[in-house]
Image (cartoon, rainbow, N blue to C red):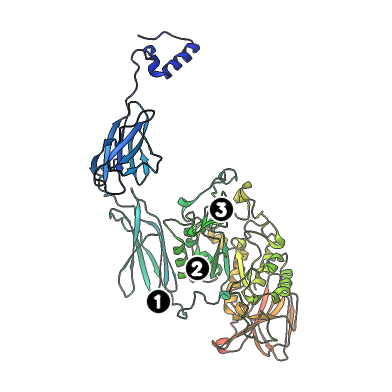
Amino acid sequence: MTPPACSGRHRALRTVLLLVGGLLLGLLPTGLSFAATSATVYYRPASAWSTVNLHYAPTGGAWTTVPGVAMEAACAGWYSRTVDLGGAGGLSAAFTDGSGAWDNNGGGNYRLTEGVSTVRNRVVTRDADDPCAVSEPDTTAPTAPTGLTAKATGTSVVVSWTAATDDTAVTGYEVTRTGGTKGTSIAHVGSTVTSQTGLEERTAYTYTVKALDAAGNVSAASAPAAVTTGEAPRTTPGEPLGGDPRKDPIYFVLTARFHDGDASNNRGGSQHVKSGNAAGGDPMFRGDFKGLVDKLDYVKGLGFSAIWITPVVLNRSDYDYHGYHGWDFYRVDPRLESAGASYQDLINAAHAKGIKVYQDVVSDNAFLNGNSYHTPDRSRFSGMNVIDMRMHMNFGSASNAFNNGKDSDDSTNDATYNVVYVDSHDYGPNKSSFRYAEGTDAWAENMSLMWTFRGIPTLYYGSEIEFQKGKQIDCGPSCPLASTGRAYYGTHLEGEVTASGFGSVSSASGQVATTLAQPLVKHVQRLNQIRRAVPALQTGQYSTAGVGGEMAFKRRFTDAATGVDSFALVTVSGGATFTGIPNGTYKDAVTGAVRTVTGGSLSVDAPGKGNLRVYVLDLGGGNAAPGKVGSDGPYLR
């Protein structure tokens, strides 16, 4: 019979009557009934039980009598039982062997739902697949890897590609190399980056890559990538990469904001929307190790042989992309790694290109004795380089930084090891909260000083194009990262670049080619070339005795063991007079000009702001002055 229409009040009453169930069952409409429910439970004991029983209670119902109902063997290690829940939506359960052994989830019992559930190692999986079902064999191969590149540095090659896909999962890659006198080589790797060293000199090689899955299916080969090696590096066995750290200018990178090589590990975090990053499609964790590997040739092309990266340890805070909220110092943050590139892959790839990787942790003296180099007393040397905060904070102008650096050098053991930079991820000069914005000429002058004065020149990412100049360096999650000094740099690096050496690029395309054409890029490239050619600029002590000029000094490095003797006279921007110097022939590394000193003095005209002169004493043989180094640019000419 159909119940009569009723008012809202009667409908509410009827609802109450229905809720009290069996007490007023006679008032329920004809044809209304409860749906039957059941649960199928699969259980895998942690140890071998000869009998397995399911002891359970439907939600709101009574427990079965101990030990419960017997479960049947379903397949190797698994037992199953389907039970009627009588309309209940779930059950509480425990398992026993009937002989005193129990698994009751540590005293809390298992909460299971209707349908299929599995219980293994105290883990419940609801709406689970039948663990005993026979699965169809996987016969589908992964897709072929794409985007294969191979780049050589000396006799080392870094091979990189875009990850393949699979209907289950790609488990590894097979890298095939042909060429050379040793025949075909096949290597198996788990990443999408691999480095091969010790190859034959001046030899053409071809690489292809295939993807593999767990079932043994192998993809088709990628398109080939060809590469030709150069000459083997002349290194001393057992010497750390790069040797003396003072020889290696540093490029400072905030990894998560540099270049995105793998979008799958991008993470916005809990502040993604609040910060405004979401609106700009700019997750805080965007750059990664794969992106850095992909752009090592950019770093090398600028002339840097060391990369300083922000901390890589696992962080845990609401806004931790910078790496300084370390939580687990024994784990690498997975938001920087990927199936494509691990931290070790980055290190291997960098080393294959002759680039050191400095992990974020950083005072005898740096003065010449007259015109002579003396062996420093390192009995009090801590073994750690320090950030030259005195110069950093006074880079409002290059001359101010120079004078403050001189005034404070007697307080460090050896200031030639000081790490010198203008701005960073924390502060600009004078503890400014904004990225340096004094203009291109001022930047050029700062760089000319840093690359010739004592210390290790360091450049914060993007400064080579005055990236985000004048922007607030950090505002936390209160504003978008794109509006700060920690903005994403990758858009300026899109395209391909191949370095032919430190400070030189053989080819570039796309946006990165535009980036490499900027005036300060050309400036820093040539500065790096000049510094590498003059040992005194890398490791020499300095003096201003007998030197007249605003930013002028002399430097010398002598090493009896290797026979190196390098003496240089430097002036930045302004003119200078050098007296009491050794007689001989001096050659300028900037212009190639040759001056002969017979009376112990040399005067140099002002080259102009950002320009400099580096007159090197020509001592002949292995200590011959290099003459003009590199080509004229926007400042050095």
Q: Secondary structure at mark 3?
A: loop
**Looking at the picture, which amino acid does disc 3 mark?**
Asp
Mark 2 vs 3, N-terminal side: 3
**Looking at the picture, which amino acid does disc 2 mark?**
Ala
* In the image, farthest residue toward the front: 100
Q: Secondary structure at mark 2?
A: strand
Cα distance between the residues tagged 2 and 3: 33 Å
* Quadrant of the drawing holding the C terminus: bottom right
User: For residue 64, which quarter of the picture?
Assistant: top left
Res. 601 mark = none
Residue pointed to by mark 1:
201
User: For residue 629, which quarter of the picture?
Assistant: bottom right
The correct choice, above or below, for 147 with respect to 397 in the image is above
What number of labels is visible?
A: 3
What percent of the width, then of the height, locates residue 437? Answer: 69, 59
Residue pointed to by mark 3:
320
The residue sitting at 57% across, 50% down in the picture is 319
Res. 499 mark = 2
What percent of the width, then of the height, locates residue 368? Answer: 68, 83
**Looking at the picture, which amino acid does disc 1 mark?**
Glu
* Quadrant of the drawing holding the N terminus: top left
Cβ atoms under marks 2 and 3 closer than 8 Å? no
